[in-house]
Image (cartoon, rainbow, N blue to C red):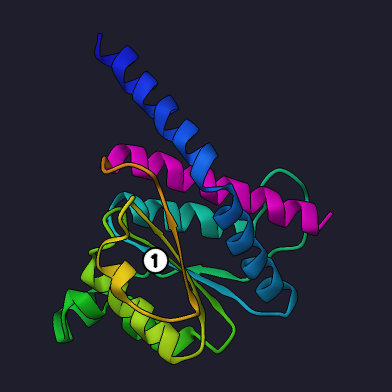
Amino acid sequence: MRAIREIKESIQVKELALETMPEMIESTGELMLDALKAGKKVLICGNGGSAADAQHFAAELINRFEIERAPLPAIALTTDSSNLTSIANDYSYDEVFAKQVMALGQAGDILIAISTSGNSKSINRAVEEALKKGMIVLGLTGEKGGEMAMIESPNLHLVKAPSPRTARVQEVHILVIHIWCGMIDAAYR
């Protein structure tokens, strides 16, 4: 039965994540917390399902996760159709997030760059621009990290979901986002 196979695979990937990811999830969460406590903001980008994750995360930061707390500065770079379409039309889709990072990002801000493969040109261009500006980049990718893993910088921190399957990677990404949200809630009690 397909449902049983899919659920078992999802559990196996999360068990592997339990073995391999906690330290990186915690350390990247602490980087984000430090930035937020210093008055910095979080910019988030992704394509397709990862765009939905970007918007979800921004909403959790601006509104709330599980407790009442002050709103935190977060912007999903995936939501302004006028910005996205004008940049894509006048330059190329590869620049849709990079141009927004150039306009909105400041040194010490956080960029959450979500790409299940790590190969998205638009996401990797945003990463490059964020690093040029002195931002801290937290990259959520699949198991190998793709082309994002080839970008060298001490300010780039990859959180790699331990699976080659897009669906499983997305499941781990939302888990990581929720863990980060829990860390933020705990820090702002």
| 47 w.r.t. 77: above or below | above
Judged from this view, the residue extending furthest toward the right is 189
Q: Using residue 175 as the reference point, say whether residue 102 is left or right of it.
A: left
Q: Quadrant of residue 130?
A: bottom left
* Residue in view at x 31 percent, y 22 percent: 6
* Residue in view at x 25 percent, y 14 percent: 2
Q: Using residue 183 as the reference point, say whether residue 168 is left or right of it.
A: left
170 falls in the magenta region: yes
Is residue 125 visible in this depiction of the protein? yes
* Residue in view at x 56 percent, y 68 percent: 74
Q: Quadrant of residue 82?
A: bottom left
Q: Position of residue 138 (x, y in %)?
A: 48, 67
* Range of residues picked out in magenta: 166-189
* Residue in view at x 33 percent, y 13 percent: 4
Kind of residue indicated by mark 1: Cys
| 146 w.r.t. 142: above or below | below
167 falls in the magenta region: yes
Residue nearest the observer in this picture, 9 or 68: 9
Q: How many numbered marks have been drawn onto this rendered protein structure?
A: 1
* Predominant SS of the magenta segment: helix
Is residue 81 visible in this depiction of the protein? no
Q: Position of residue 111 (x, y in %)?
A: 48, 73
Q: Tag 1, which secondary structure?
A: strand
- The residue identified by callout 1 is 45
Q: Which of the image's four quarters has the C terminus?
A: bottom right
Q: Position of residue 124 (x, y in %)?
A: 30, 73
Q: Which of the image's four quarters has the N terminus?
A: top left
